[in-house]
Amino acid sequence: MAHVILVTGGSRSGKSAYAQKLAESLPGTRAFVATAPIIDEEMRERVLRHQQARARSTGWNTIEEPVELAQALSNARRFDVLLVDCLTLWINNLMYEAEKRSQTIAEEEIEQLCGGLLNACSGRPGTVIFVTNEVGMGIVPENALARRYRDLVGRCNQAIAAGADAVTFVACGIPLHLKG
């Protein structure tokens, strides 16, 4: 089974940079599993900055997968280290896909999907690093959709943290090791 690490923190906390450095410290082949959909010019520029940061290092491959993460993890067996950035956007993408079908996603479904991610990790060697935002530390969102998003991300984070070997919270660029 892969060694599973969850890196969490607030927006712009330094969690992605920390996760990238961690991945680069590990031996073997590496792949970045990107979940971000490019929906506008600002997002395109943001993705480009992340790609450029990885390009300064050597040995990165990129897998673009906004929705089918478990399948992407299963198909990427040739890589020793996978960095999935991020679960927060994955939840966003799942909600968007469900909404296109006039459906909603329940917390129980998110738990099942996270179980599928952890199952995919159990069938592979190496290390899988998941990055996620901690969205539950701020104010209660004013609308039902934002509250549901916060709840689904919180449920995802709990499920992955429970199955992870290590969990690190990053604040102000400083890692705080919570588990493992």
Image: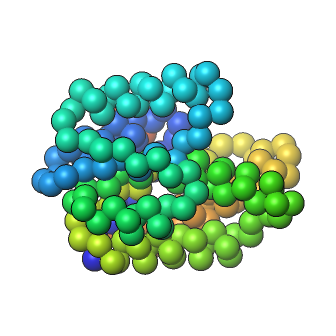
Residue 4 x, y percent position in the rendering: 33, 66
Residue at 26% of width from left, 42% of height from top? Answer: 60
x, y (%) of residue 162?
A: 45, 72
Res. 142 image quadrant: top right
Residue 103 visible, this orientation: yes
Tell me the quarter of the picture where residue 165 sits. Answer: bottom left
**Colouring scheme applied when the structure was drawn:** rainbow
Q: How many marks?
A: 0
Q: Indicate left or right for 140 with 132 as reference.
A: right
Q: Residue at x 77, y 48 (%)?
A: 146
The relative height of residue 92 versus residue 124 in the rendered view (above or below) is above
Compared with 112, 35 (above or below) is above
In this rendering, position of residue 53 left or right of residue 94: left
Q: Left or right of 118: which side holds 43?
A: right
Q: Where is residue 114 in the image (x, y as percent from the top left)?
A: 53, 70
Left or right: residue 21 compared with residue 164: left
| Rendering coords of residue 105 (x, y %) | 74, 66
The residue located at (85%, 52%) in the rendering is: 144
The structure residue drawn at horizontal position 32% and vertical position 28%, both measured from the top left corner, is: 53
Asked which quadrant contains residue 44, the reply is top right
Furthest residue toward left: 27
Observer-nearest of 160 and 27: 27
Q: Nearer the viewer, residue 132 or 54?
A: 54
* Residue 178 visible in image: no
User: Which quadrant holds the C terminus?
Assistant: bottom left
Assign the N terminus to one quadrant of the image.
bottom left
